[in-house]
């Protein structure tokens, strides 16, 4: 499983081959246009801080569910690969 690292506050994964790759969240936040950043700021102001944080927390929970799913999926794949020669 790739090792997660924070570099300058941004998420990266070091893969088994040693290569370092940015997380999806890092890529999305780094490629956001000024118009998109402004739209999020305006949305946040229109719904208020409490609602904005509720949305952010919901997104964090969904993100964690996805990560857990893929951790288990790739972990299982790794285990299957270990035993392929015996199947």
Image (cartoon, grey):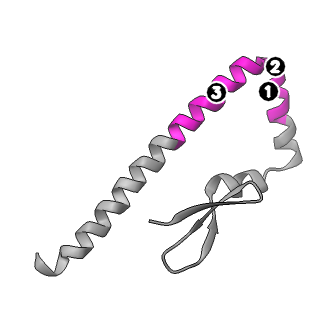
Badge 3 crowding class, 10 Å Cα cut-off, few under 14, some 14 to 19, many 20 or more, is few
Nearer the observer: mark 2 or 3; the answer is 3
57 in magenta: yes
The residues bearing labels 2 and 3 have C-alpha atoms spaced at a distance of 13 Å
Above-or-below relation of 55 to 16: above
Q: Where is residue 63 in the image (x, y as percent from the top left)?
A: 53, 42
Judged by its main secondary structure, the magenta piece is: helix
Q: Which of marks 2 and 3 is nearer the N terminus?
A: 2
Residue identifier under label 3: 55
Residue identifier under label 2: 46
Residue identifier under label 1: 43
Identify the image quadrant of the N terminus.
bottom left
Q: Nearer the viewer, residue 51 or 12?
A: 12
Q: Is residue 62 left or right of residue 72?
A: right
Badge 1 crowding class, 10 Å Cα cut-off, few under 14, some 14 to 19, many 20 or more, is few
Residue 87 occupies quadrant: bottom left
Q: What element carries label 1?
A: helix
56 in magenta: yes
Q: Is mark 2 on a helix, strand or loop?
A: helix
Which stretch appears magenta? 39-63
Q: Which residue is found at the position 41% from the left and 55% from the top?
A: 71
The residues bearing labels 3 and 1 have C-alpha atoms spaced at a distance of 11 Å
Badge 2 crowding class, 10 Å Cα cut-off, few under 14, some 14 to 19, many 20 or more, is few
Q: Nearer the viewer, residue 23 or 35?
A: 23
Q: Which residue is found at the position 81% from the left and 42% from the top?
A: 36
């Amino acid at each position: 499983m790739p090792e997660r690292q924070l570099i300058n506050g941004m998420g990266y994964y070091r893969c088994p081959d040693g290569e370092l790759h940015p997380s999806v969240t890092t890529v999305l936040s780094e490629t956001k246009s000024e118009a998109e950043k402004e739209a999020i700021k305006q949305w946040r102001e229109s719904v208020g801080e409490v609602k904005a944080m509720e949305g952010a927390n919901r997104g964090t929970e969904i993100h964690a569910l996805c990560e857990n799913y893929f951790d288990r999926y790739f972990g299982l794949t790794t285990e299957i690969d270990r035993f392929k020669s015996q199947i």
